[in-house]
Image (spheres, grey):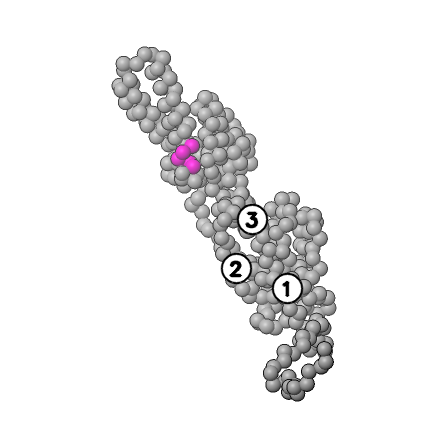
Amino acid sequence: MSELVTGEAVALELRPAKLPSRALAVLLDLAVALIAYLVVATGVVIATASLDEAAQTALSIAMFVLLLVGGPVAVETLSHGRSLGKLACGLRVVRDDGGPIRFRHALVRGLIGVIEILMTLGVVAVIASLVSARGRRLGDVFAGTLVVRERIPVTRTGFVPPPPPWLAGRFAGLDLSAVPDGLWLAIRQYLTRMQQLDPQVAWSMAERLATDLAGRTGAPAPHDVPPAAYLAAVLQERQAREARRAFGNGAAVAAPPPAPAAYGGGVAAPVGVPYVPPAGVPYVPPVPPVGAPYVPPAGAGHSPVAPDVVRQPAATTPQDEPPATGFAPPA
């Protein structure tokens, strides 16, 4: 079993393909490519019988490269890693993170496959697959890909509650490149199960994970944000970056549903009820966004200081003016 971690911090239990199934898929692909090459080569030879020998040789080399190299590359790119042989054997080529391959991955696999499969009759590919822990040949190593089995049971993953709305975009400037996949997976597993834990245990685990995450990002965790909410907000930021990388910068990311529980002990909090931390755990209220009016907590005996109001003189009306007496002061 191979554990791959996606951009959503989900562990994919993918089974690498065994050598016999991969060899059968390669043989099927080569058979189809050779049949297509012979058919096209025969037609081209008949159509170019009037050309000289050098031109026919150049056409033969071009057809060989086009059909035996360009053909598999185009098929794997358009089918996202499913060639005819792999489709028949239930296999698929994926990236190291479990995502679909692109043209550059298929191109590297095809070019190196000419050397380790066609020129050496598959000897180099067999040796590399036997030595690799996940059965990868040299083309997979250089392309960053993996051949896995598709026909396996799909496991369901837990629901990760979204962070509070007032944390949206607050951690957009964090550097997440140094955070390992194992820590992302631990954070996701905690967020999916924190409501099942004791409040004190959940809070201590959140603080420990937040400390580890802050150490990897190089920025301290904010003191005005509960640890669980901080973890959820950073995890959502990573998912948003993966979505932008996969679908483009202009792709719209769907807004998450409202959080069903408060981030602090896994205790559900209705709308309008302030968050109450577990007993004995200090809590610092979050800072409201810039521009939002200050609202005192329930039961507070003070009121916010109102800004100074500059009173303008009241406008006069004809009724307020003194009656005219007809007296005019001397010049």
Residue 327 visible somewhere in the drawing: yes
Q: Which residue is mark 3?
A: 241
Label 1: how many Cα within 10 Å (few below 14, some 14–19, many 20+): few
Q: Is residue 96 magenta?
A: no
Query: Is residue 19 shown above or below 197?
Result: above
> Which residue is drawn at the image coordinates 36% and 28% (left, top)?
33
Query: Is residue 258 shown above or below 147?
Result: below
Q: Which mark is residue 256?
A: 2
**Magenta segment, which residues?**
73-77
- Disc 3 marks which amino acid? Arg
Q: Are marks 1 and 2 in contact (CB under 8 Å)?
A: no
Q: Are marks 1 and 3 in contact (CB under 8 Å)?
A: no
Q: Which mark is residue 291?
A: 1
Label 3: how many Cα within 10 Å (few below 14, some 14–19, many 20+): some
From mark 2 to mark 3, how far is it between C-alphas?
Answer: 15 Å
Q: Which mark is residue 233?
A: none
> Which residue is drawn at the image coordinates 67% and 61% (left, top)?
225
